[in-house]
Image (cartoon, rainbow, N blue to C red):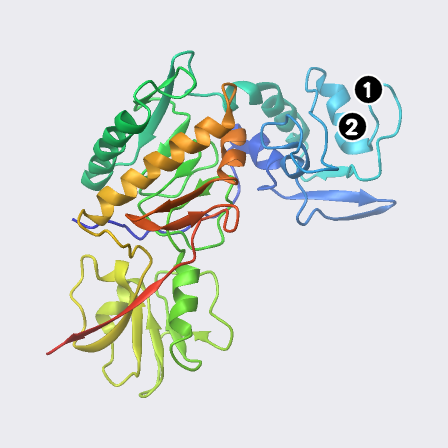
C-alpha cells in the first residue's frame, strides 16, 4: 500500500460559473484595479486578503472591516467606485476594482450574500462533519484519526463531536487529490504539497516537495532536476530542470523519472515517497525523508493520522464555539506540536506544512 500518492498540484485556473464569485473574492480569478485613469492588473490583491476569507474582517492591524453584503448595489459601488453606503469616499487603501466580465459583479455579490452558510458548512449544533479521501490509505487514516480523537477529546470540542461524513463537510482530511475551489479546506492530505499552494485552502503535515528538493540540492554542487510529472514549482538556485543529464552530473529525479536513472549520474538523489511503490534503482542513491521521527514503532500512515487528530482538536479549541472554515485556518497559524511520533510541526513559522525538516538517507542496491 502506498502511503502518499503523488498527484498534480492545485492549479488556480478559471472557475466554473457557480464558483466564479468565490474565485473573485479569494483572488483566484483575474481582477484589475483603477488608479486614476489607468487600469492595472490587481497582482497580490484580493477581497479576502484584507477582509478575511469569511468576510468578517481581517486579523491584522489595518485590515479591512467586515463586509456588508445586504445591499448588492451598494456593495458593488464600494468595490468598483470606492463609495460607501453613506455616499462618502472610502479610504485610498480600498482598491477600485475593475471586473473582466460583465457578470463578475453579480457573481461576487451572490457569493458574499451566501458566504456565512458556505463558511459553516458541516458545522451543526452538536456535530462537526469531516470527510476523507478515497482508497484504503484514507480509510485507515480515518480509523486511526477517530481512535485518537476518542482518546484526547471524548466529549468533542465545544460540545460538538467530530463525525465522519460523505456529505458536505466542514473540513476534509487525507485527501488524495488537491482541492477544487468550492471544496472544504484540506488538512493533512496524503499527497505531498509542491510548496506553492495557498495555506488558506490546504495545510500539510510534512515538508513540501520544494523543501525536500532544496535539502537534496545541498548535498552536491548545482546539477539537473528531472521532473516529468511537474511536481516541483521551480528548480533550486543554480540548478535547472531538464529531461536528461550528462554522465557525472548531480541529478535529482522526481516521480516517474526514478525508473529511468542512469547509473553514470553522480550523485543520484530522490524522494523517499517516489520509491513507495517502485523498486529502487541499482547502485547508491540519496533519499529525502520528511517524516523521520524518534518513535517509529507504528506505521507512518498511523502516526500521520494521530498527529492530525492532535492538531485538528488543538486548532478547533483555539478557534472557538463560533468557528468557521476561515477562522479555523487562522487558528492553525497559531498551532505548534512537539511529539516523539512525528517531526515538530510549527505553523507559526511555516503556515503551509508546519515543517521544513528533511532527513537524508543513503540507499545502496546491488544490481
Q: Does 248 sit above or below residue 193? A: below
What is the x, y in percent for residue 67?
A: 69, 24
Q: Is residue 358 visible?
A: yes
Q: Which residue is nearer to you in this view: 315 or 363?
A: 315
Q: How far apart are marks 2 and 1 (CA)?
A: 8 Å
Looking at this rendering, what residue extends furthest in the top direction? 125
Query: Is residue 315 toward the left or the right of residue 38 in the image?
Result: left
Q: Does 362 sit above or below residue 330? A: below
Query: Is residue 322 toward the left or the right of residue 44 in the image?
Result: left
- Where disc 1 sits, the SS reads loop
Q: Does 367 sit above or below residue 101? A: below
Q: Which mark is residue 271?
A: none
Question: Quick one: label 1, few (<14), some, or many (20+) residues within 10 Å?
Answer: some
Q: In which quarter of the image is residue 337?
A: top left
**Residue labelled with disc 2:** 78
Which residue sits at x=48%, y=38%? 332
Q: Does 109 sit above or below residue 299? A: above
Q: Which residue is nearer to you in this view: 216 or 19?
A: 216
In which quadrant is the C terminus drawn? bottom left
Looking at this rendering, what residue extends furthest in the left direction? 367
Q: Which residue is nearer to you in this view: 99 or 8?
A: 8
What is the x, y in percent for residue 130?
A: 35, 26
What is the x, y in percent for residue 193?
A: 40, 51
Q: Quadrant of residue 269?
A: bottom left
What is the x, y in percent for residue 197?
A: 48, 49
Which residue sits at x=61%, y=19%? 113
Q: Which residue is nearer to you in this view: 294 or 290?
A: 294
- Where disc 2 sits, the SS reads helix
Q: Are marks 2 and 1 in contact (CB under 8 Å)?
A: yes
**Residue labelled with disc 1:** 85
Which residue sits at x=62%, y=24%? 112
Amino acid at each position: 500500500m502506498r502511503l502518499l500518492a503523488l498527484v498534480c498540484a492545485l492549479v488556480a485556473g478559471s472557475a466554473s460559473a457557480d464558483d466564479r464569485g468565490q474565485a473573485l473574492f479569494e483572488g483566484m480569478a483575474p481582477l484589475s484595479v483603477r488608479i486614476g485613469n489607468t487600469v492595472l492588473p490587481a497582482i497580490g490583491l484580493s477581497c479576502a486578503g484584507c477582509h478575511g476569507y469569511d468576510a468578517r474582517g481581517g486579523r491584522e492591524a489595518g485590515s479591512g472591516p467586515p463586509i456588508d453584503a445586504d445591499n448588492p448595489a451598494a456593495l458593488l459601488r464600494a468595490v468598483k467606485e470606492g463609495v460607501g453606503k453613506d455616499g462618502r469616499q472610502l479610504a485610498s487603501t480600498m482598491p477600485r476594482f475593475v471586473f473582466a466580465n460583465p457578470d463578475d459583479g453579480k457573481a461576487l455579490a451572490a457569493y458574499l450574500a451566501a458566504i456565512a452558510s458556505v463558511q459553516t458548512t458541516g458545522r451543526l449544533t452538536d456535530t462537526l462533519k469531516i470527510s476523507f479521501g478515497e482508497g484504503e490509505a484514507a480509510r485507515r487514516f480515518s480509523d486511526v484519526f477517530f481512535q485518537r480523537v476518542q482518546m484526547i477529546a471524548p466529549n468533542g470540542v465545544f460540545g460538538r463531536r467530530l463525525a465522519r461524513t460523505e456529505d458536505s463537510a466542514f473540513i476534509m482530511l487525507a485527501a488524495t487529490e488537491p482541492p477544487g475551489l468550492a471544496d472544504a479546506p484540506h488538512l493533512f492530505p496524503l499527497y505531498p504539497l509542491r510548496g506553492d499552494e495557498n495555506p488558506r485552502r490546504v495545510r500539510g503535515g510534512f515538508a513540501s516537495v520544494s523543501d525536500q528538493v532544496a535539502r537534496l540540492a545541498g548535498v552536491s554542487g548545482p546539477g539537473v532536476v528531472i521532473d516529468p510529472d511537474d511536481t516541483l514549482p521551480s528548480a533550486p538556485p543554480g540548478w535547472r530542470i531538464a529531461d536528461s543529464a550528462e554522465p557525472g552530473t548531480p541529478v535529482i529525479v522526481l516521480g516517474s523519472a526514478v525508473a529511468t536513472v542512469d547509473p553514470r549520474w553522480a550523485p543520484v538523489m530522490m524522494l523517499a515517497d517516489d520509491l513507495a511503490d517502485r523498486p529502487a534503482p541499482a547502485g547508491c542513491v540519496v533519499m529525502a525523508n520528511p517524516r523521520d521521527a524518534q518513535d517509529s514503532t507504528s506505521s507512518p500512515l498511523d502516526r500521520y493520522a494521530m498527529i492530525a487528530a492532535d492538531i485538528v482538536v488543538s486548532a478547533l479549541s483555539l478557534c472557538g464555539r463560533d468557528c468557521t472554515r476561515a477562522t479555523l485556518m487562522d487558528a492553525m497559524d497559531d498551532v505548534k506540536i512537539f511529539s516523539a511520533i512525528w517531526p515538530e510541526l510549527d505553523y507559526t513559522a511555516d503556515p503551509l506544512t508546519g515543517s521544513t525538516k528533511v532527513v537524508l538517507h543513503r540507499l545502496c542496491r546491488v544490481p
